[in-house]
Image (tube, rainbow, N blue to C red):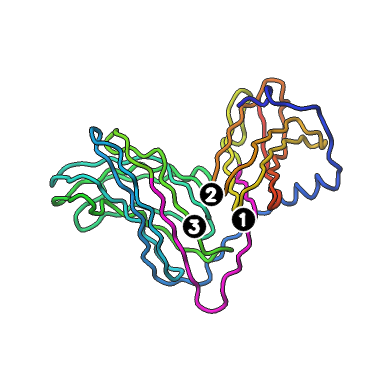
């Protein structure tokens, strides 16, 4: 959406509030990896053939100790012949990036990974593109490959991993979600719920470019974005309305009347505020 089309009258924030926001934006998100145990966690992704009807993807809940490696199983809803190639691409969204850190795709005894890319766009969002080859017959419901990553001891113990916009051999595949529930040994992990805002992409951004921010809320909340220059003047106020818990990506188009420079972007929710920087260049 264009920042020009949704602007409100300019307003100010106090210098003290602006300084506090700047300090908050400069503090990186904390990840804790003190405990490491082995856990295998599986979620299902049902893949539909290009000519097949879209199937409903089951949602798995898996429980285990915080581990060195967590594996999410991507499964097929159709039979695949030996030596057939399967190309998968799409996006995945992490409900809690402090619990799971995706690293790579691995094959099974029945498949091998011929090519794989996993690109992090923000701490909570990734794009993936993987090509597999069947070494033997794959029956419907069998595992095609595994998304492997590190289990982290974060500020919570639950992470929802959602596969979105998935395509199999350029045909649509049903979306799916997996829930990872971790458990630590010793003192229980604290449950601290608050809103998080990832840095924008691209950043720096040029006029007329669109910048994207990923944010997460853990409970239903009204959501607003505010963009401020370093003088504390609000140049945009975007009301996103009431949102349920989840991960979201909001996109903004920088207008020609936005001056080059550094801006603070603020996310306001009923579970706290989050801040990050935006740099506009020519």
Magenta stretch?
Answer: 176-199
Whole-angstrom CA distance, mark 2 to mark 3, is 13 Å
Q: Are marks 1 and 2 in contact (CB under 8 Å)?
A: yes
Residue 170 magenta:
no
Q: Nearer the viewer, residue 67 or 26?
A: 67
Residue where numbered disc 2 is placed: 123
Which x, y percent locates residue 121? 50, 42
Q: Nearer the viewer, residue 227 or 6?
A: 6
Residue where numbered disc 3 is placed: 159
Residue where numbered disc 1 is placed: 29
Query: SS for tag 1?
Result: loop
Residue 268 as seen in the image, left or right of residue 20? left
Image height of 128 relative to 51, above or below: below
Tell me the residue at 53%/55% (across/down): 96
Residue extending farthest to the top is 256
Which x, y percent locates residue 29? 62, 55
Which x, y percent locates residue 15? 86, 44
Q: Quadrant of the N terminus?
A: top right
Tell me the residue at 36%/54% (across/down): 147
Tell me the residue at 72%/51% (across/down): 24
Whole-angstrom CA distance, mark 1 to mark 2, is 9 Å
Residue 193 magenta:
yes
Which callout, 3 or 1, points at the residue further toward the start of the chain? 1
When asked about the image quadrant of residue 204, the answer is top right
Residue 211 as seen in the image, left or right of residue 46? right
Disc 1 crowd, CA 10 A, few/some/many (<14, 14-19, 20+):
few
Disc 2 crowd, CA 10 A, few/some/many (<14, 14-19, 20+):
some
Q: Quadrant of the C terminus?
A: top right
Tell me the residue at 20%/46% (across/down): 133
Residue 79 as seen in the image, left or right of residue 257? left
């Amino acid at each position: 959406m264009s920042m020009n089309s949704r602007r409100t009258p300019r307003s100010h924030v106090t210098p003290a509030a602006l300084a506090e926001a700047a300090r908050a934006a400069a503090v990186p998100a904390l990840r804790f990896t003190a405990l490491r145990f082995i856990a295998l966690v599986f979620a299902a992704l049902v893949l539909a053939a290009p000519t097949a009807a879209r199937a409903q993807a089951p949602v798995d809940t898996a429980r285990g100790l915080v581990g060195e490696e967590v594996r999410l199983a991507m499964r097929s809803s159709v039979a695949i012949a030996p030596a057939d190639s399967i190309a998968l691409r799409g996006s995945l969204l992490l409900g809690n990036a402090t619990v799971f850190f995706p690293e790579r795709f691995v094959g099974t005894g029945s498949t091998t990974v011929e090519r794989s890319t996993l690109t992090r766009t923000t701490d909570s969002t990734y794009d993936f593109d993987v090509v597999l080859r069947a070494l033997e017959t794959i029956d419907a419901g069998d595992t095609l490959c595994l998304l492997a990553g590190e289990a982290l001891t974060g500020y919570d113990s639950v992470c929802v991993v959602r596969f979105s916009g998935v395509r199999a051999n350029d045909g649509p595949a049903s979306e799916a979600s997996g829930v990872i529930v971790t458990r630590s040994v010793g003192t229980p992990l604290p449950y601290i719920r608050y809103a998080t805002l990832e840095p924008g992409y691209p950043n720096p951004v040029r006029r007329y470019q669109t910048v994207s921010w990923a944010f997460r809320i853990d409970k239903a909340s009204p959501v607003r974005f505010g963009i401020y220059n370093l003088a504390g003047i609000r140049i945009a106020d975007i009301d996103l309305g009431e949102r349920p818990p989840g991960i979201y990506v909001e996109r903004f188009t920088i207008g020609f009347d936005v001056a080059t420079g550094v801006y603070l972007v603020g996310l306001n929710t009923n579970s706290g505020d989050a801040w990050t920087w935006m740099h506009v260049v020519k």
